[in-house]
Image (tube, rainbow, N blue to C red):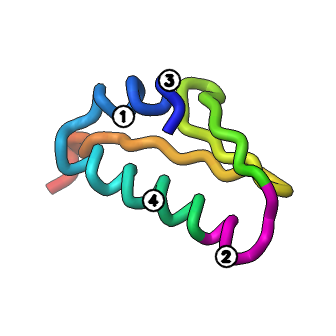
Amino acid sequence: MKPEIKTKFSTYPDEAQRKLEAVHHLILAVAEENDLGEVEETLKWGEASYLVKGALRFEWIGRRKTLMP
């Protein structure tokens, strides 16, 4: 995992970190299993981004309070 991705994930709550790290490993495994070539990891707009013949970005967003019951 690139240091900037690891640093970004470290800003999230522990449970979110574990889930996002699992997604990270899943992306790499799927790319390898399907011979999609090298996976480019980067931050785009402050979000983890994985580029393999296309792009996948994801971000953890905490629960928001609403005014509705």
Q: Secondary structure at mark 3?
A: helix
Quarter where residue 46 is shown: top right
- Write down the residue under mark 4: 23
> Could you tell me how far apart the alpha carbons at marks 3 and 4 are, in whole angstroms?
16 Å
**Residue at x 71%, y 49% (from the top left corner):** 39
Could you tell whether 1 is left or right of 21 in the image?
right
| For marks 4 and 2 on the same chain, the one whose residue lies earlier in the sequence | 4
Determine whether label 3 and label 1 are within 8 Å by CB: no
Residue 37 spot, x, y in % from top left: 80, 58
Determine whether label 2 and label 3 are within 8 Å by CB: no
Residue 18 spot, x, y in % from top left: 27, 52
Q: Secondary structure at mark 1?
A: helix
Q: Mark 4 Cα within 10 Å, few/some/many (few <14, many 20+)? A: few
> Could you tell me how far apart the alpha carbons at marks 4 and 2 are, in whole angstroms?
15 Å
Three-letter amino acid code at disc 3? Glu
> Could you tell me how far apart the alpha carbons at marks 4 and 1 are, in whole angstroms?
12 Å
Quarter where residue 64 is shown: top left
| For marks 3 and 4 on the same chain, the one whose residue lies earlier in the sequence | 3
Along the viewing direction, whichever of 27 and 69 lies nearer the viewer:
27
- Write down the residue under mark 2: 33
| For marks 4 and 1 on the same chain, the one whose residue lies earlier in the sequence | 1
Residue 8 spot, x, y in % from top left: 41, 27
In the depicted structure, whether residue 27 falls above or below residue 4: below
| For marks 2 and 3 on the same chain, the one whose residue lies earlier in the sequence | 3
Q: Mark 1 Cα within 10 Å, few/some/many (few <14, many 20+)? A: many
| For marks 2 and 1 on the same chain, the one whose residue lies earlier in the sequence | 1
Nearer the viewer's eye, disc 2 or disc 1?
2
- Write down the residue under mark 1: 9
**Residue at x 29%, y 26% (from the top left corner):** 11
Span highlighted in magenta in the image = 30-37
